[in-house]
Amino acid sequence: MAKNRFHDGPGPSQRQLRVSEVIRRQLSDVLSRGEVHDPELNRMVITVGEVRVSPDLKVATAYVVPLGGQNADEMFELLKRNRNELRRAVAKGLTMKFSPELRFRLDETFDQLDETRRLFSDDTVRRDVE
């Protein structure tokens, strides 16, 4: 494979970013419409915050969080149990030769945002910023 002359950093390529966003939208739509034949999973409201794709586009890691941040263990069990059906449903909206394997991780960006807000609301930090 030829070296990409426009991308030499350790971050994702434009293709990876494009594919990951398409997968994120598809997965989010599948989960919100309840297209999976598992009533327990369809009852849960799951937010897909980000999807990261491996350089060979074979593995997609979805960062998800349940509504309210509770019952994460149950959510992961349901997602793991329905991984193949989710993969097929997501593949319908992709124009790729292969459908990537789906992996799920807890999205912690909301917790990080709360911590950042807490830090910025601290009197000492606000005094230094002003």
Image (cartoon, grey):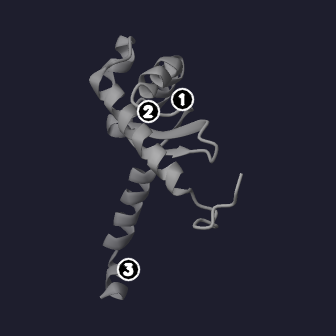
Kind of residue indicated by mark 3: Val
Count how many numbered circles sit on residues in the image: 3
Identify the residue at image location x=44%, y=38%: 23
* Residue 55: percent from left, percent from top: 63, 48
Which disc, if any, is residue 94?
Answer: 2
Relative to 45, 83 lies left or right: right
Identify the residue at image location x=50%, y=56%: 14
> How dense is the environment of label 2, judged by Cα within 10 Å: few (below 14), some, or many (20 and up)?
some
* Residue 92: percent from left, percent from top: 41, 24
Viewer-nearest of discs 3 and 1: 1
* Residue 73: percent from left, percent from top: 50, 28
Please say if 118 is above or below 49.
below
Which disc, if any, is residue 3?
Answer: none
- Spatial separation of the CA atoms under disc 2 and disc 1: 8 Å
Residue at mark 1: 99
Contact between labelled residues 3 and 2, with CB atoms less than 8 Å apart: no
Identify the residue at image location x=31%, y=71%: 121
Answer yes or no: is residue 92 visible: yes
Kind of residue indicated by mark 1: Ser
Please say if 104 is above or below 55.
above
Residue at mark 3: 125
Please tell me which of labels 3 and 1 falls first in the chain.
1
Please tell me which of labels 2 and 3 falls first in the chain.
2
State the residue in front, 54 or 118.
Answer: 54
Contact between labelled residues 1 and 2, with CB atoms less than 8 Å apart: yes
> How dense is the environment of label 3, judged by Cα within 10 Å: few (below 14), some, or many (20 and up)?
few
Please tell me which of labels 2 and 1 falls first in the chain.
2
